[in-house]
Image (spheres, rainbow, N blue to C red):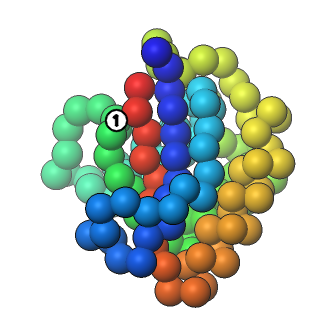
Amino acid sequence: MGLDQYAFVKDTLDQEEGEELAYWRKHPNLQGFMERLWRNRNEGSISGDFNCEQLPLSLEDIDLLESAVTNGMLPETHGFFFGGNSDEDYKEADLKFCAAAREALNAGKVVVYDSWW
């Protein structure tokens, strides 16, 4: 068991499945970043855990993520199944994801983050 995280590219948000754009295993601070986006977007209308929730990402979200990764500012996040801080281990992959996500979004695609723990 553990934290598995994915990003998919879809043609539309309601499309069942998409093409895998990225995969992370136990990158807790990325999970914390995405959970903050999810909670901010759904303020007052959600409760519970950010688990198995599809989060569509915008160009602005990708810009924020890229800045947080580049500047070592992903939020420290802990969870029983999350593992330890892996920001440096994933830094290059995170930046590659940001570039690929930006390219997909600029092409009119939808980029979705999903996680399971």
Residue 36 appears in view = no
Asked whether 34 or 17 is in front, the reply is 17
Question: Which quadrant is home to the C terminus?
Answer: top left
Asked whether 4 or 78 is in front, the reply is 4
Residue 104 appears in view = yes
Asked whether 107 or 30 is in front, the reply is 107
Q: Is residue 99 left or right of residue 39?
A: right
What residue lies at 69% left-to-right and 24% top-to-bottom?
A: 85
Mark 1 lies on a secondary structure that is loop
What residue lies at 76% left-to-right and 39% top-to-bottom?
A: 90
For disc 1, the marked residue is 51
- At label 1, which amino acid type do we have? Asn
Q: Is residue 60 above or below residue 77?
A: below
What residue lies at 26% left-to-right and 53% top-to-bottom?
A: 43
Q: Is residue 23 above or below residue 12?
A: above
What residue lies at 44% left-to-right and 70% top-to-bottom?
A: 10
The number of numbered badges drawn on the structure is: 1
In the image, residue 19 lies at what x, y percent?
51, 62
Residue 55 lies in quadrant: bottom left
Residue 42 lies in quadrant: bottom left
In the image, residue 77 lies at what x, y percent?
55, 28
Q: Is residue 114 above or below residue 104?
A: above
